[in-house]
Amino acid sequence: MDCNCVSDLLLTPPVPALWTPGIAFPDWAYKPESSPGSRQIQLWHFILELLQKEEYQSVISWQGEYGEFVIKDPDEVAKLWGLRKCKPHMNYDKLSRALRYYYNKRILHKTKGKRFTYKFNFSKVVLVNYPLLDMASSPFLLQNHFNGGSAAPDCSPVTPEALQSLFPRLPESGRGTSLFDRVATVPGPEGDKLRLDTFPFLSSAAPCYSKPPSLLGPYPRNPPFDYPWGFNPYLSGAFSLNNCPKLPPGSLYPSHFYPNPLQTSLGQLPHPFSSLLPPGEVAGGGQRGAAGQTGVTNGTAGGQPRLCLPPYPGALSLGRTDIVNGGSVGERERRESNTPGTEPGLGLGLGLGLGLGGMGLGGVAGGATEPIRAARRGEAGPRVRLRPGDHRSERLQLRQRQRA
DNA sequence: GCCGGAAGCC
DNA sequence: GGCTTCCGGC
């Protein structure tokens, strides 16, 4: 059955009144071009999406240090993610596994001691999103960082000198002026010297800061933050996402959506970057550049907003038991269709919401697990998966019920 | 809750 | 490659 993915759940961002206009998380963070090598939305993108939406503040929100966020309602986040990916059996356990894969990629790390709390490593995000910045071959930003380096790569200081060595390498925008020279024209307390603390997202690499957050310049690190040049993860920016496999590929992002990668990237960059472009060339992001964010900026410029509607009518925030009657029928459903007592297609809603009846379902548990463990120990052949109703699933389901 | 291995899927 | 699913262990 089709997944009914149509368009965007999360678009039409209302700009929270309490948020400071002119400051926003940069648009690029919400664009699929920020997910190189992937045509599907990536989880960290989705997380950013949720984070920038006021209506999900009760579900997930920025909290604590810069880039740190807390998942207030893990089940709901998982559900939303499942909806987006058309995975009706998604849960927090699986979602968190996906998040943990980001640790090695240094996109995220866990805030230890705080439940459901993670932290973005914006330096990585920047690298991912600014391929035009030749960082890999530059002393800028942790030369060891992404090349298998070892010594505290995330803590490598980013010096002004390193920055200066980087920026002349940026492709010229055709105006013949060094980008860095333009940066140098930006008025600031230190004149033409590029301040390190102008780039908190570069210097705040995980797991520690090159400076303690409190020393990263004049920008407070406790909400409400006041980030420079429109870079504030607390605030709403634009995004447009589409991961709906049912949509024709051509509809995703019109070719004119990103007319000039450099221009667009720079335009999306916060102030000192976007200001590098001549007036009138600050595509899209210009509205949040010198002029500041006027309110709803919208990453759908040139394209239609896309929604990934849940496969059921009504509002997004549904009861926990209200999940998908008939999402895409994947392998799980096929397996479940052979599981006694389990209706195919009823999925997680029944499984979790109604509790599956818990004990005794399937009767697989005891006998089946030992071969599985043996297989895991390498004593047997191919992996055998447990089915819902086995001891592990019961544990998980029990936890889910308890949480609910 | 969190972690990371392993296998599978797309 | 980026998850998803499942798991044992802590």
Image: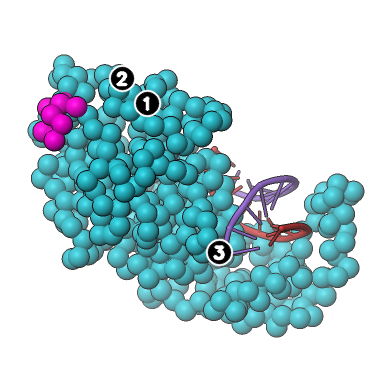
Chain colours: A cyan, B purple, C red
> Dot 2 corresponds to which residue?
A165
Q: Is residue A8 above or below residue A353?
A: above
The amino acid type found where label 3 is placed reads: Tyr
On screen, A65 above or below A357? Answer: above
Marks 3 and 2 in Cβ contact (< 8 Å): no
Report the chain holding disc 2.
A
Q: Residue at x 51, y 69 (%)?
A: A75
Q: Earlier in the sequence, mark 3 or mark 2?
A: 3
Label 3 crowd (10 A; few <14 / some 14-19 / many >=20): many
For the residues labelled 3 and 1, the Cα–Cα distance comes to 36 Å
Secondary structure of the residue carrying tag 2 is: helix
Marks 2 & 1 on one chain: yes
Our reading of the magenta stretch's main secondary structure is loop
Q: Position of residue A241 (x, y in %)?
A: 37, 51
Residues under numbered marks 2 and 1 in contact, where contact means CB atoms less than 8 Å apart: yes
| Image-quadrant location for residue A259 | top left
